[in-house]
Amino acid sequence: MKKVISFLMAAAMVTSLVPATAFAAGDVTATAKVIDALERGKDFDGVIDAANAPELQLKVTSADYTTGGSTPTVDVTVSLDGAEFTATDAAGFEGMVKVTNPAAVTVATKEFSEDEVTYTLTGQLKKDDVVAINLASKMTKVSVGKTATVSVDSKMAKADDLVYASVLDKGIKASVKKTVSVAVDEVATINSKGLKIEPSVDDSYAVGTQFTLKLSKGFEFANTTVTGAADWAIDGSEATFTAPSVDEFTLTGIKVEATSAKVGDVATIKVTAKNVGTASVEVAKVVDYKVGVSVDADEDVPVIYSGTDVNNTGLTDDSDHMTLEVTAEETFPGAWSMRQGFNFTLPEGVYVTDVDVIEAENFLQGNVAVGTTEWEAAFKAAYDKGDYNGFTFAKRVFDDVNTNLAADPASVTFKLQLVADPTFEGDVKLGFEGALVDAQEVTVAKFVKPYTVKAEQNDVIIDYRNTSVQTPITITEAEAGLWAANSVFTLTVDRGDMIQFEDDATFSVNDSGLELKDEKTKDGQLAFTVKSESDEAATVEIKDIALFMQRNVPAGAYDLKAETAMSTAYDKQAIYAADGKDNNIIDDVADYSKVVKEAFINVVTSGRDNDNLFTTKVVVPVGEAYLMAGSTKVELDVPAYISATNYTMLPIRAVSKALGVNTNNVLWSAETKTITIMYAQRIITMVVGQKTINVNGSSIPASAAPEITGDRAFLPMRDLATALGVTDITWDAATRTATLNGGK
């Protein structure tokens, strides 16, 4: 049987999924798991042959080979406790190991003993690669209660004492797929997959072994027959039957009544096999709402890339964009009142492209039984009514209640096909709400971005052509090989009619295998096309960037925007329940921002020759949370104060207010403790603790140094005036007011 890696831990499962601490060390991070752990009875001879042996699997969660040019190697030491390997030579140990891509990664035995082996892996592992080690061995002791464990010591992962074989006395296990909800004084059928009972080890029980099921306090069994046990009998909270098989078997149709249980109580069934053992399993929970919404907790949440269509245009990903199955179900027949409407809600920026109604049971419409077809029609009408942001179901979309109260509770199970704005990232929580239902939500999918853009703010003074952008733009791929060949990326500065990229930018790619073509500036935009897919997550760096700016471009901040092959296809994606008029595709209903870096370009002045001196009169009452800039009163979050050296100290926020400039032009760097002020043609910098002002690259002695007070940066008003070319500063001791007389 093909072994499958799972990242969920469930003690009731036969598969042993014992988590190990995973951490980054060197180039690779991995998690360690034991798959198909053995459980044997007291007659076990201890021999674990290769054909039936569990596997120790190391799954790579990240791999980074951006540094160094040599072929990477990593040692992995595997040690046993309570067992010894059956391999006797290096070749035998190497034969126990399989890797996902043997052409890329080779395995050699470095050293070994009876209970420990060290392997050397040579080559580049990739994310999601698996190193599988067969644990063929022999237990040293095989009495009841003994175990064999495996430990891993490596730079890529560490794990201690993962149990891979156990010797057990006879016993039983019991499980259900998931718990169900039940209302007070009502009856619920336990999960449709039934109650599964199985032996802990072979021959734990025989056909005809007496079984007893005992419900916890407040609950009773409510049906006299079940599927799977011909001699089922109940007496209040107790049920009896005999085993129909020596192997696992399932009882379906078991009904539980919450006779005296209260909201929040959990129904637990204790399963007892006579002279064998017991097991307990939770089957139901008492809730105070009448309709419950759930997903299968054992299923992994689907991960979908945002900003592309359902065909994943521009990407190599094969996701079908479908959510988990969602079930909305009454806790008892007739509980779902349709007198008022109800809604299924989605996060802003997430849109539906299709709905698959898998099952709909016990709903009536006009007193006629209806199913998936009618629910699909209802979903379409509801999405239209919800303005394509969610589903708004009208009043009495189905009959008010199921009039046949003897029937099973009504339930509908469905999946949604989703797309999301390029800006959306995170869990998709499907909400359920309405006037006559309790609000709930379940996580049905997760969106991640296929790329990230990193850029810094660049403060520039207009120079018509070749205005230099000092920092690069980097675009990073979310995972190896994700960007498809011929995918186009385009970058634009806001107000492209006035600010355009020049032709001299250079494009480079990290050592990832990604190749580009058509790297160029076209129509004032930076653009490149993927020529071939990457082997490792790629990073594209664009530097030596220059701008052509119109002379009359207003001072202020201008954003960097991105468009890609993915976003183009996303905008054209057909939406669910399209009306054929105004709302047909995503572009008709979505309103997302294409900005990937706000204030990428900050124009300090709106004219080359504009170097006017500061002309405003600024009055600063010390200790007051305001200042006067001309005739305008400016509120401050913290007041100015007098320093120990008798200088008026202004908070940074006050500076931008006093100068009447955009806050982007007054900057604070916590890392370097530097204040930067850009006013007209002047770029002024001061560093906390240093009595020097730098104006356009020239240093001027200062009378005082900037200070940190109460986690806020303050600068001396007199030195700010000097930097602005203002010499007239007065101090009124009576009113404790400092005045900066601009223009003098």
Image (spheres, rainbow, N blue to C red):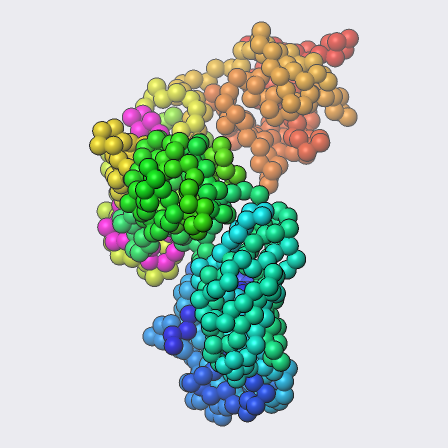
Side of 670 where 313 appears, left or right:
left
Q: Is residue 610 above or below residue 488?
A: above
Q: What residue range appears in magenta? A: 476-498
Residue at 33% across, 58% down? 481
Work out whether residue 624 or residue 153 is closer to the camera in this orientation and state it: 153
Work out whether residue 640 or residue 361 is closer to the camera in this orientation and state it: 361
Q: Position of residue 704 (x, y in %)?
A: 69, 26
Q: Magenta: predominant secondary structure element?
A: loop
Q: Position of residue 482 (x, y in %)?
A: 33, 55
Q: Is residue 645 above or below residue 264?
A: above
Q: Is residue 507 above or below residue 658?
A: below
Numbered label tally: 0
Side of 623 where 249 appears, left or right:
left
User: From the image, which quarter does the N terminus lie in?
Assistant: bottom left
Residue at 44% across, 89% down? 92
Q: Position of residue 81 (x, y in %)?
A: 61, 83
Side of 506 where 63 appears, left or right:
right
User: From the image, which quarter does the C terminus lie in?
Assistant: top right
